[in-house]
């Protein structure tokens, strides 16, 4: 059975070692002022380039009555229109490309549950700059040349696998391109190949941990020292759980396919205090999602990103729907950090008027004794009123009395912290769907 006993484990890995200053790339040693100058130059180039090469951008700029010449300082970016997922869908598949197809070397797409997929095309230069920011991310996480990197992000149209792969190779690591699934085999490969680094979704690491347990192998004894985890929201509680059960440093990586893929922002292992955005390639803003106006650093709102170096498919002021806060840099002082994401505005569940995010339940479930970290949220209707039921797997086949008290404890904590009444059902171990990549947390059975 696992090493976890009472919610958040006491022993975690703490912080990792900081790299020496001279080990950082010149881009990571830039001061804020140097970086702002680079950003302005690149932003002016990007806006003009998009205007000249992508008819959809030219039209949008004209409709908004703004011209690339008007971008004289960084704050002028606010005059330019936003780009949304809908814009990418309306121009499906290749209408947002700024180059002819003969210059495109790779196409990725994100499935999306409704409507057309969003498609991104990359030139050879784009793939190289993506590998550069990914290599930088893996280094910031503590990866070093010579490490073996087990990649269990999916390979394919999803950007996770190939994005991680090119970055790890660029850093000088040996990649192990396992992709998702075949969990029993992954445990075997980790045991045999002895990788130092693993890259995957945090919920897939939980799936892997169960498999370690099932095979009777102590995951804390594995060769893994660093987990570079992202593609879905996760909490400090889950970090503590993974760090103690796997005896590794678990750090957060962020990105999205519309902008590039993984490697837009990365947490540094020596501080573990949010994700430094690689601002020489991606210009961040945070806006009020309703007013659609920029907010000062330190305020929470929707992250908006503009690419600064992309040629195949530049994006101007892309509304990510991700909610976060921008803060000054720490381990990489030139780059601002973004807080761990609380969720996407479109993941938000409005339950009888109260806004809740699926991720809030992770904190509560992981902090309750006797429960596994595996849970699902079921949304349904009763008498035309939305209801939410939290299904949680017991750690071991439980006595009915224990199960009832854990359920009542969860319901009470949800009521206290989130202010909503939910149903809670403790289910038998191994009955809920396991993550193979991005986990589907919410099962929505409502008719509307
Ligand atoms: O998930 C790219 C990626 C791959 C990132 C591997 C990190 C690691 P998409 O499929 O386009 O791309 O989904 C992007 O996933 O807008 C966020 O809502 C969410 N997301 C990504 N990273 C994180 C994270 C990839 N660290 C969408 N924390 C984004 C929370 C994340 N959510």
Image (cartoon, rainbow, N blue to C red):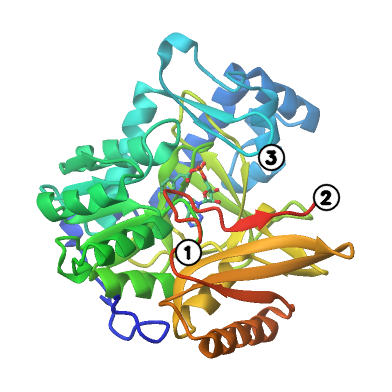
Of tags 2 and 1, which is closer to the observer?
A: 2
What residue did someone put label 1 on? Answer: 234
Q: Earlier in the sequence, mark 3 or mark 2?
A: 3
| Residue 80 image offset from top left, x and y in percent | 69, 38
The residue carrying mark 2 has its beta carbon less than 8 Å from ligand 1: no
Q: Which mark is residue 448?
A: 2
| Label 1 CB less than 8 angstroms from ligand 1 | yes
Q: Residue at x 20, y 41 (%)?
A: 175
Which quarter of the figure has residue 9?
bottom left
Residue depth check, mark 1 versus mark 3: number of the one nearer the observer:
1
The x, y position of residue 276, in whole percent, is 41, 58
Above/below status of 278 relative to 360? above
State the SS at label 1: loop
Alpha carbon separation for disc pair 3 and 2: 29 Å
Name the residue: 42% across, 49% down.
436
Towards the viewer: 193 or 266: 193
Label 3: few (<14), some (14–19) or many (≥20) C-alpha neighbours in 10 Å = many
Query: Is residue 169 left or right of 418 when viewed as pictured?
Result: left
Please tell me which residue lies in front, 355 or 341. Answer: 355
Q: Does residue 183 appear to the left or right of 301 in the view shown? A: left
- Mark number displayed over residue 306: none
- Residue 233 in view in this figure: yes
Considering only vertical position in the picture, is 99 above or below 163? above
Q: Residues within 10 Å of mark 2 (few under 14, many from 20)?
A: few
C-beta proximity under 8 Å, tags 2 and 1: no
Residue corresponding to mark 3 = 82
- Name the spot of residue 135 as percent of width and height, x first: 27, 44
Determine the CA span between mark 2 and mark 1.
28 Å
Disc nearer the start of the sequence (1/3): 3
């Amino acid at each position: 059975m696992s090493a976890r006993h009472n919610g958040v484990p006491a022993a975690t890995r703490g912080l990792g070692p900081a790299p020496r200053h001279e080990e950082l790339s010149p881009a990571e040693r830039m001061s804020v002022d140097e970086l702002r100058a680079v950003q302005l130059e690149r932003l002016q180039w990007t806006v003009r380039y998009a205007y000249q090469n992508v008819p959809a951008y030219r039209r949008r700029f004209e409709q908004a009555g703004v011209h690339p010449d008007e971008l004289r300082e960084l704050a002028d970016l606010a005059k330019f229109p936003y780009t949304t997922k809908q814009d990418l869908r309306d121009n499906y598949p290749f209408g947002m490309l700024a180059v002819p197809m003969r210059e495109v070397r790779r196409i990725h797409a994100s499935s999306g549950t409704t409507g057309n997929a969003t498609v991104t095309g990359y030139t050879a230069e784009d793939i190289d700059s993506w590998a550069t920011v990914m290599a930088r991310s893996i280094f910031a996480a503590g990866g070093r040349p010579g490490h073996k990197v087990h990649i269990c992000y999916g390979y394919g149209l999803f950007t996770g696998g190939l994005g991680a792969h090119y970055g790890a190779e660029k850093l000088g690591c040996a990649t192990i391109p396992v992709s998702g699934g075949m969990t029993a085999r992954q445990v075997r490969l980790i045991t045999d190949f002895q990788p130092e680094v693993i890259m995957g979704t945090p919920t897939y690491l939980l799936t892997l941990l169960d498999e370690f347990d099932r095979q009777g192998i102590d995951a804390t004894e594995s060769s893994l020292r660093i987990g570079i985890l992202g593609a879905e929201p996760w909490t400090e509680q889950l970090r503590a759980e993974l760090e103690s059960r796997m005896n590794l440093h678990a750090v957060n990586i962020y990105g999205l396919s519309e902008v590039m893929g993984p490697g837009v922002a990365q947490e540094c292992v020596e501080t573990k205090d949010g994700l430094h955005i690689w601002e020489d390639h991606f210009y961040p803003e945070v806006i009020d999602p309703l007013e659609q106006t920029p907010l000062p650093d330190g305020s929470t709102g929707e992250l908006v990103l503009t690419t600064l170096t992309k040629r195949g498919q530049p994006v101007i002021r892309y509304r990510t729907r991700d909610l976060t806060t921008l803060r000054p840099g720490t381990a990489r002082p030139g780059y601002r950090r973004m807080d761990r994401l609380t969720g996407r505005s479109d993941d938000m569940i409005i339950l009888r008027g109260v806004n809740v995010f699926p991720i809030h339940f992770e904190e509560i479930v992981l902090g309750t004794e006797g429960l596994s970290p595996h849970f699902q949220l079921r949304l349904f209707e009763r008498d035309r009123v939305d209801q939410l039921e939290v299904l949680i797997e017991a750690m071991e086949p439980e006595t009915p009395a224990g199960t009832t008290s854990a359920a009542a404890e969860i319901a009470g904590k949800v009521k206290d912290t989130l202010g909503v009444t939910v149903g809670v059902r403790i289910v038998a171990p191994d009955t809920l769907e396991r993550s193979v990549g991005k986990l589907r947390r919410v099962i929505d059975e409502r008719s509307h």
